[in-house]
Amino acid sequence: MLLPIRPSSLDDDAALTPTFRPPEGAPPLETLQLAPDEHDWSISRNLAELTGKLEVVKDLGVVRFEDIDLDLTRRVVERYTFADDDVNSVRGETIWHMGFEREGWKIQTRTKTVLTSTVDAFHIYAELDAYENDSRVASKTWNTTVARDFI
C-alpha cells in the first residue's frame, strides 16, 4: 500500500499556518490570603524492609474573594506506598477537603479514595461526606473491583 505524499514548499507551508492574535483573558480576581498555604513533597525509603513512601501536600490555605465575600479552603494529601518489587503492594490514597464560606453560610466536602491491586483486579474504595454549617448532610461510600484483564 502506498500513501500519497503532499508536495511541500515554504510558500505553501506558510500559507497553511494561521495567524492568531495574543490570547485574551479577564484580569485575576482580587484575593486575600486568610490562612497560609502549605506545599510539601516527602519521600522516604526503608532500605532494610525495601519499602517506600511518597506524601504530597497541596494546601491552598484559606483564600477570600473580596468582590463576592467568599472564603475558599482547599487541601489535598496524597500518599503512595510500595514494598520491594511487589507491584501488588502499591497503594495510592488521596484525601481532599474543600470548603466555601461566607457570613452565615458554610459548606464543605471531604473525600477519601484508595487504590490497591491484586494479581487479578484493581480495588477502588472511596468515601464522600458533605457538610452544611458543620452538620453532615450527605455521605456515600463506594467499594469497586475492576478486573485487570491482562494489565
Image (cartoon, helix red, strand yellow):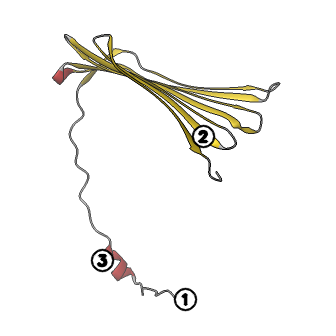
Disc 2 to disc 3: CB gap under 8 Å: no
**What residue is shown at x 65% (from left), y 53% (from top)?**
150
Residue 122 circle label: 2
In x, y percent, where is residue 49? 80, 25
Residue placed under numbered mark 1 in the picture: 1
Residue that mark 3 sits on:
15
The span from disc 2 to disc 3 (Cα, nearest Å) is: 50 Å
Q: Is residue 7 left or right of residue 148?
A: left
Indicate the amino acid at tag 1: Met
Q: Nearer the viewer, mark 1 or mark 3?
A: 1
Could you tell me which residue is drawn at 20 percent across and 40 percent down? 26
Residue 108 at x, y percent in the picture: 33, 19
Give me the disc on residue 46: none
Q: What is the secondary structure assignment of the residue under circle 2?
A: strand
User: What kind of element bears circle 3?
Assistant: helix
The one of 33 and 59 positioned closer to us in this rendering: 59
Q: Nearer the viewer, residue 59 or 150?
A: 150
Determine which quarter of the picture holds residue 14.
bottom left
Single out the mark in the foreground, 2 or 3.
2
Q: Quadrant of residue 6?
A: bottom left
Query: What residue type is disc 2 on?
Result: Phe
Which residue is found at the position 19% from the left and 19% from the top? Answer: 69
How many residues crowd mark 1 within 10 Å: few (<14), some (14–19), many (20+)?
A: few
The answer to whether residue 51 is visible is yes
Amino acid at dot 3: Ala
Instruction: Confirm whether residue 97 shows in the render.
Output: no
Residue sitting at 40 percent across and 84 percent down?
9
Circle 1 SS class: loop
The residue furthest right is 48
Say which label, 2 or 3, has the lower sequence index.
3
Question: Of marks 2 and 1, which one's residue comes earlier in the chain?
Answer: 1
